[in-house]
Amino acid sequence: MGRSKGSRWIRRLCRISPRVTTLSLPDEVLLDIFEFCLPYPVERRAKAWPKLVHVCQRWRYIVFASPLRLDLYLLCTKRTPVREMLDIWPPLPIRIDYSSIDPQAEDNIIAALEHRNRVSSISLSWISMPLENLVAVMEEPFPELESLYLHKEGTVPVLPNTFLGGSAPRLRSLHLEGIPFPTLPQFLLTSNDLVDLSLLWIPHSGYILPETMATCISALISLTKLSIGFESPASRPNPTNRRPPPLTRAVLPALTNFDFHGVSEYLEDLMAQIDAPLLHRVEILFFNQLVFTFGIQQVPRFIGYAPALMPFYSAFIYSFVSSAGVAFSPRRRPPIGESEFLAFDISCEHVDWQVSSVAQICNQLSFVLSSIDHLSISEQGWRLLVGMDDTQWLELFQPFTAVRTLRIFNKIPSPVLEGLSGGSAMQVLPALEELQLSAYRPSYHDKLPFVVARQRSDHPLVVRQLREQMW
């Protein structure tokens, strides 16, 4: 409301006599104009409002009389003399934003953290100094804290149960990367307003059981984004202590985005205990493993309660040097850049294992893939598979029984098109009607073994040239 009102006043000022100055405007109108003109994002806004208060005493009074409406705050960065700044300005909210932190910055950070009743946001990334001194300052409550981001590499001390005084009732965003926090479940019980929770590169010293994780996030009814990722595959459930799925599951009513990086057993146990009916995007990254016995069976049930994701109409299989994966979308185009999709990625450098891993995932999801009629493939990492036994290709394509359009974004030669010929070309994609290629010249289309075999059958193909590239 303020911005639109301010905009109207600015347009009106442009039409009236140039002899009319800001002195003629009432305080409320000036406030509207200030609100309209102060920029975002955070860094620009923090530098802009001090210029207003230095214009005159009246402007200074108007600005400081409305700190909430103008979203005023003090931004502490590497270039900020914090103690001097805090002595000059009124007691406004403090936002701390440091990256590539070295020991020389410690005094500045501690100076800001000492004003814990005013700190609303803390972002400390790429910390190259011991955390003990900072953690010691942060063992008291921060009652106004709304956002916390900590990223540390190397040896990291475990956050104590007294961290932030054991509670953060106003916290809305929590990101911990490489930070062990074993008592996190108890801490989250006090953060009912949390909207964004990201726990990445969790060291084994910070491992939290999947049933404990499910219990603590079930109380976060406002949570929209959840990311859980482990540092190594050593963080996994003990197979002798695994429990059967519960009869009732916790519902995360607001969750739209879910990311996971770890072993499939952990994902299986976690998904078995939660439902998320508003899911739009699910990204799953597995560590390298040869057999996906666990971790996939719960996925169809988990996404089956999310109407925004189902049914799937397109799939995209991709490969790189050190990973491969598959993504599914409810739209009939490759799910790159889409807001709704389900994706699996497997960290693996052996290209034949990549094909096997993707094939296992697709086959375990086969009964939710029956509606897919558009399939896209990017073979960048599979160039060495030319001449591979067609058994793995048959396994990979077996679940895609309804695909009518196949797009291949490839380099020459194509492992898929070269590997599927003769009888094997007829055993896959029985509903295929159109093949779109990005690399082969149109004059060579009819010479491809896969195309030749299909053209001789009762299911000929229309072959088209793809002009766009996937990457």
Image (cartoon, rainbow, N blue to C red):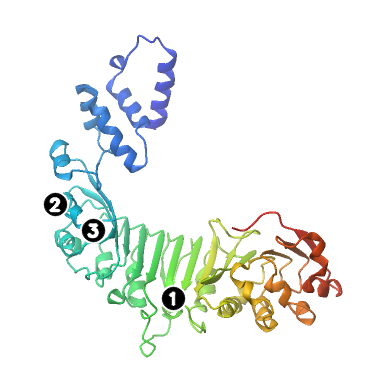
The circle drawn on residue 114 is 2
- The spot of residue 24 in percent (x, y) is 30, 14
- The spot of residue 107 in percent (x, y) is 15, 52
Q: Describe the element under mark 3 as helix, strand or loop.
A: loop
* 10 Å crowding of disc 1: few (<14), some (14-19), many (20+): many
Residue sitting at 29 percent across and 39 percent down?
46
Among the 4 quarters of the image, the one containing residue 69: top left
Query: What amino acid type should be assigned to the residue bearing mark 2?
Result: Glu
Report the side of 178 relative to 163 (left or right).
right
Residue sitting at 39 percent across and 88 percent down?
239
Residue sitting at 53 percent across and 56 percent down?
339
- The spot of residue 415 in percent (x, y) is 68, 73
Task: Give the distance between the C-alpha atoms of the residues marked 2 and 3, in whole angstroms.
Answer: 16 Å
Query: What amino acid type should be assigned to the residue bearing mark 3?
Result: Ala
Residue designated by label 1: 267
Residue designated by label 3: 168
Q: Point out the image quarter for the N terminus.
A: top left
Say whether disc 3 or disc 1 marks the residue closer to the N-terminus.
Answer: 3
Task: Give the distance between the C-alpha atoms of the residues marked 3 and 1, in whole angstroms.
Answer: 28 Å
Eye-nearest disc, 2 or 3: 2
Among the 4 quarters of the image, the one containing residue 185: bottom left
- The spot of residue 471 in percent (x, y) is 59, 58
Say whether disc 2 or disc 1 marks the residue closer to the N-terminus.
Answer: 2
Q: Describe the element under mark 2 as helix, strand or loop.
A: loop
Decide: marks 2, 1 in contact (CB < 8 A)?
no
